[in-house]
Amino acid sequence: MKIFIDTANLDEIRKANEWGIIDGVTTNPTLVAKENKDFKEIVREIIRIVDGPISVEVISTDVEGMIKEAVEMSEWSQNIVVKIPMIPEGLKAVKILNGRNVKTNITLIFSVNQALLAAKAGATYVSPFIGRLDDIGHDGMQIVRDMVNVFKLYNFKTEIIVASIRHPLHVIEAAKAGAHVATIPFNVIEKMFAHPLTDIGLERFLSDWGKVPNR
Ligand code: G3P
């Protein structure tokens, strides 16, 4: 499973990238707004840091507007993936953008049917938002498991990015489900490192090493 970082914060992206675990980046308008910086500048810097797919989202909701934004952003780098909302106009745009070799990530997916339609339209990625489904009392991860099965059954090339991840257990479940990608917030990546037995074990090794004569 590939690991993307779900943030527009450059320090977080730099740190995680130095750990050697980042395959790509996903952003959205909310994450970009948090940074209070010029959008293009943020994306240009991400492109310099990470050599992998970088998702950036359109704001238009009509086909012409989405295509105009998507084509412009895709010219910034061949790693740009354009995030398009899961609406009928969005799928129309995907079909046209495929013809222009622009990669797409269909966002705000909350059901297997939505993922199926996006895959049929030829999306490069679909992003099911599992945390937001959990928030309203649905089992978010179940739709990921179902999507993985359906995509396998029919040999869809579209990759599943598990998004709206809230805690490390979501990452384990995404990996067990066979998702292609998990896009993970920085604070969750940090938690994935942690284990008390690692800390205790390291402390003991270092203190025992102190007892070795003539080291
Ligand atoms: O990037 C899309 C997704 O990961 C958003 O997550 O926490 O706002 O539901 P969240």
Image: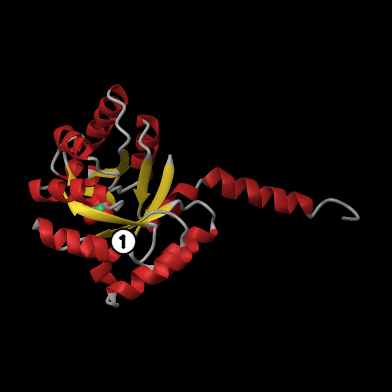
- Residue 171 position, x and y percent, is 37, 41
- Residue 166 position, x and y percent, is 30, 49
Closer-to-camera residue (200/59): 59
- Residue 164 position, x and y percent, is 26, 49
Vertical arrangement, residue 112 with respect to residue 36, above or below? above
Within-10-Å neighbours for mark 1: few <14, some 14–19, many 20+: some
Please state, as top left, top right, bottom left or bottom right, where the N terminus lies in the image.
Answer: top left
Q: How many numbered discs?
A: 1
Residue extending farthest top: 153
Asked if one can make out residue 105 in the rendered structure from this viewpoint, the answer is: no
- On screen, residue 178 versus residue 61, left or right, reads right
Vertical arrangement, residue 185 with respect to residue 145, above or below? below
Amino acid type of the residue that numbered disc 1 sits on in the rendered structure: Ser
- On screen, residue 146 versus residue 2, left or right, reads left
Residue marked by disc 1: 74
Please state, as top left, top right, bottom left or bottom right, where the C terminus lies in the image.
Answer: bottom right
Task: Please tell me in which quadrant of the rendered image residue 113 appears.
Answer: top left
Closer-to-camera residue (51/72): 72
Residue shown at the point (24%, 28%) measured from the top left: 146
- Residue 199 position, x and y percent, is 58, 50
Residue shown at the point (30%, 44%) measured from the top left: 124
Closer-to-camera residue (186/107): 107
